[in-house]
Amino acid sequence: MRVWAVPLALLALAVCVTCSVASHQQKEPPIAPYKAAVVDPAVLAKRLVSMQYGSGWPRSRKFDCSKLKCVALTFDDGPGEYTARLLDLLRKRDVKATFFVIGQMVAADKGGHLVRRIVEDGHELGNHSWSHPALAGLSHDAVQRQLQHTNDLVFKLTGVRMHIMRPPYGSTNAAVAAEARQEGLAEILWSVDTLDWLHRVPAAVTRRAGEAKPGSIVLMHDIHRTTVEAVPAILDLLARKGFTFVTVSELYGRTPSPGRTYTER
């Protein structure tokens, strides 16, 4: 979460994660046209077959989280300059996570190298809107554009259709949920907020992530260096407590249902 978003974020936290934003509609940030680099069809087809993308993506490792102490680590607002380092750390520990990406950030990474690496490393992708507005304050058409533009760009770059989304600031209402359903997206909130965007101290991020319970969804942001620096300690701490690291879909043992809202298992 960006620093400029602090006032709105604090308001969202104070009310509740499914807060309603004031009834008047806010002005939607402009969505600039973007021509995605097209993946070679032969290469994309090979990926689709070998990695089972599409409706079966990401491939589940078939954890039974009704019996295991599962936790889903999630990262918002990227991909950014620290995402590659985070992916290195997760790969070294064979940990899979869920990345809720912003369309503008994906577009800024020319060629889509980071979002493709997220997919190729076996992580789950989720839609975090195009430009990070509070969706509950937008018109129906604006919410649709925010979700569709990001969905379309990610698909052009990776061949993946995302099945989950996270509304920025947790700002959602019945209209946002209905549009998410229309786009085939489940709303994924969280049960553990590390507040890593506010307190840029790795030890503090680790301590808050360590409050996870079986079935928790942990909120972090891969755009912050201090968060990435905290990840090894977070993995060590939760591993000592007997946790198994899973993606959001693995946490539920299936793809979450479009339009429904999830905060933990």
Image (cartoon, rainbow, N blue to C red):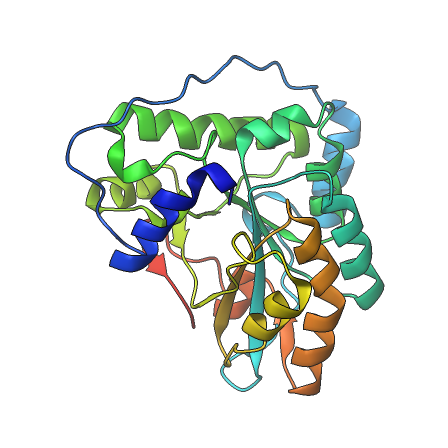
Residue visible at 43% across and 40% down in the picture:
5
From this view, report whether residue 175 is shown above or below residue 110.
below
Q: Residue furthest right?
A: 92
Instruction: In this rendered view, identify the residue nearer to me: 214 or 152.
Output: 214
**Is residue 185 something that shows in the picture?**
no
Classify the position of the C terminus by image quarter. bottom left
- Horizontal placement of 243 versus 8: left or right? right
Q: How many marks?
A: 0
- Horizontal placement of 65 versus 48: left or right? left
Instruction: In this rendered view, identify the residue nearer to me: 47 or 4.
Output: 4
Estimate the x, y position of residue 150 in percent, counting from the top left.
Answer: 51, 30
Residue visible at 38% across and 24% down in the picture:
145
- Horizontal placement of 97 versus 81: left or right? left
**Is residue 20 something that shows in the picture?**
yes
Picture quarter containing residue 203?
bottom right
Instruction: In this rendered view, identify the residue nearer to me: 72 or 222.
Output: 222
Estimate the x, y position of residue 42 in percent, counting from the top left.
Answer: 78, 27
Estimate the x, y position of residue 101 in percent, counting from the top left.
Answer: 56, 40
From this view, report whether residue 104 is shown above or below residue 239.
above
Q: Residue furthest left?
A: 23
Estimate the x, y position of residue 143 in percent, counting from the top left.
Answer: 33, 31
- Horizontal placement of 203 versus 177: left or right? right
Residue visible at 49% across and 82% down in the picture:
66
From this view, report whether residue 101 is shown above or below residue 228.
above
